[in-house]
Amino acid sequence: STLIAMGAIPIINENDVVSTHELEEIDDNSLIKFGDNDKLSALVARRIYADLLIILTTTDGYYVTRDGKMEIVKRIKKITPTMIEESSGKSSMGRGGIKSKLRAAAIAMNGGVHVIIANGTKEGILNRILEGEEEGTIFISEVDKRCV
């Protein structure tokens, strides 16, 4: 909390050296087992009452198919089970692809944290996001985190 009070921005990355074998999932609804950076970052964002979680990936955000064309969705207020089910699985670079990111965004949003999924391969992406430029897809939480 001291670092956050000083304005530090946590960067969350599950480290392969840190063992998670003791964190077994109790049931399908448990938030104990993480196993990927997306879920881990969402859990930390909720725990520290963050205003915003930025999840970086290799795409420009969340896409849908409209009239046979892929289009980026700029703003989302609710993640539905259908959105998660219809999302592609693992990417070639990571464990969970957009499906994992949507699940993480839902966890964060349920804790009052807004989420941006954006392209981490773009030069200066974090600066642009922090300066308020529209990048990626923003997931707007309508939950008051003071009530969580």
Image (cartoon, grey):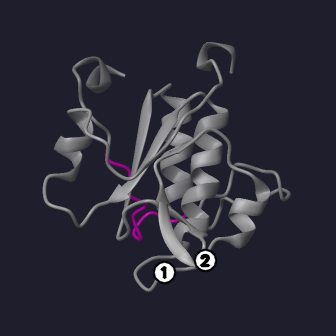
| Label 1, residues with CA under 10 Å away: few <14, some 14-19, many ≥20 | few
Residue 132 appears left or right of 142: left
Q: Is residue 15 above or below residue 137?
A: below
Name, please, the residue furthest toward the front: 67
- The x, y position of residue 126, in whole percent, is 22, 46
Q: Is residue 39 above or below residue 85?
A: above
Q: Place residue 102 in its image quadrant.
A: bottom right
- Give the residue number, with chain letter if any, for mark 2: 88
Q: Magenta residues: mostly which secondary structure?
A: loop
- Give the residue number, with chain letter if any, for mark 1: 91
Residue 143 appears left or right of 60: right
Residue 103 appears left or right of 132: right
Region of the chain picked out in magenta, as a range: 11-20
* Tag of residue 55: none
Q: Say what secondary structure mark 1 lies in.
A: loop
- Residue that appears at 42% across and 34% down: 52
Q: Of circles 2 and 1, which is in front? A: 2
